[in-house]
Image (tube, grey):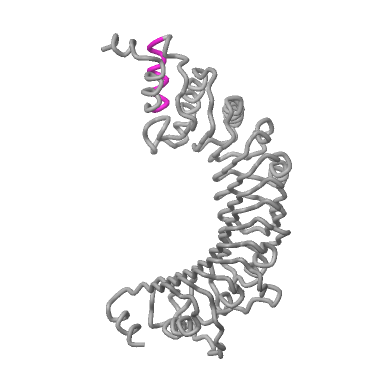
Amino acid sequence: MGDYISELPDDVVSYILSFLTLRDAVRARLLSRRWRYLPYCRTVLRLDALNVFGNEGYNRVSHRSKFVRLVDQFLDTLRDQTLRVLVLHFGLDNEYSSHIDSWILRAVTMGIKELDLGCQLNLSSCCTSWISHLTTLHMFGVRMNHNDMVFILSSALNLTSLSLEHCCYPRIKCLKVELLGLKKLLIDDISLDIKLNCPNLEVFECIGPLSNLTLAHLPFLRQAKVFPIGRRDGGSSIIAELIRFAPHLKALSFFVRPLVIQPLPLTARISKSCLKQLDLVMLVPYGFDLFGITYFINACPSLEILRLKLRPLTFTRQSPQKEYPDCQHQLKEVEIDTYSQKYNLVELVLYLLRNAVALEKMVIACSDKEKLTTLLQN
């Protein structure tokens, strides 16, 4: 069998080795001088517990030294290698920052432009030599102080995509992003003020107890997802900010936990708004007046798709009844998830039907036949 394997072409052997864990690949390469420096045939290099050890459970403090040793050995076997993406997810802390810096720098020399980094370290302990080479950066669980953030946003001038997920920002009150080439920005689990000045931004996502959002002109923003968990103003001011400074925004997904949905300011009622799709995820108490949603619909005259997901709160709060004058809309599709008789949803549905001029489809999710019958009777 050994003779048969040795007769295989290098590219076939390299392809076979690429399916092994890094630990087994290192062992296999040591079996033959010819195999030792065979190229890694994949352009995405994943360094995590599953791909190094073959077991996701091997991500403990006791496995750190072995992980570092295996990665060092594997990278030493690569010659004239071309990589596109490096994924590094392991519980390494500042003690191993020099190794992490060395791995990323070596990957940069192999051509990587995308880095997915998930380690328990302070960013200031590395990254000074490679950050400017990246076009895509995703960080998970990384600690960044004010100086780290300033350094990234001043040095990563080639970034087109930046993602910050469950990162820690001690002593940072405001996240100011000014990257001229940035096209995609994703921020998860953040409670800071955010100031954006990214004129080429096309996609923006922000999830967390957002304190405040300040925007400059975003002429190319097409898609936004903002879940400002914890705000009690219904998020009206944030939606107004997006509609005002992103005139070509086409799709907006928004999380609302209102006690009262406030009307949008008059500055947000822009007749030239390009918004075509609005997804609202709402945590609302029983008895809440859903007609407040019409403020959002009427502020976006070009809206064609409305998706409404209701997530009930456990308490009841009776909203004051208001008069809502009829206003025609251009909706073509309406989807409502979680129908309940404890909301005035029937009245809202009838309002939408009565004022529809282009409606093609309406989908309402009902949990049982009794609720469906009640809805149809109305």
- Judge left or right: residue 88 versus residue 210: left
x, y percent for residue 143 = 61, 44
Q: Is residue 215 above or below residue 58?
A: below
Kindly identify the residue that appears in the image at 57 percent across and 58 percent down: 223
| Magenta-drawn stretch contains 303 | no
Q: Quadrant of the N terminus?
A: top left
Q: Main secondary structure of the magenta part?
A: helix
Kindly identify the residue that appears in the image at 49 percent across and 37 percent down: 90
- Judge left or right: residue 339 versus residue 173: left
x, y percent for residue 53 = 39, 30
Range covered by the magenta-colored residues = 21-32
Residue 24 seen anywhere in this rendered image of the structure: no
Residue 348 seen anywhere in this rendered image of the structure: yes
| Magenta-drawn stretch contains 28 | yes
Q: Is residue 71 above or below residue 151?
A: above
x, y percent for residue 346 = 41, 84
Q: Quadrant of the C terminus?
A: bottom left
Rendered image quadrant of residue 129: top right
**Residue closest to the far front:** 358
Looking at the image, which is closer to me, 296 or 220?
220
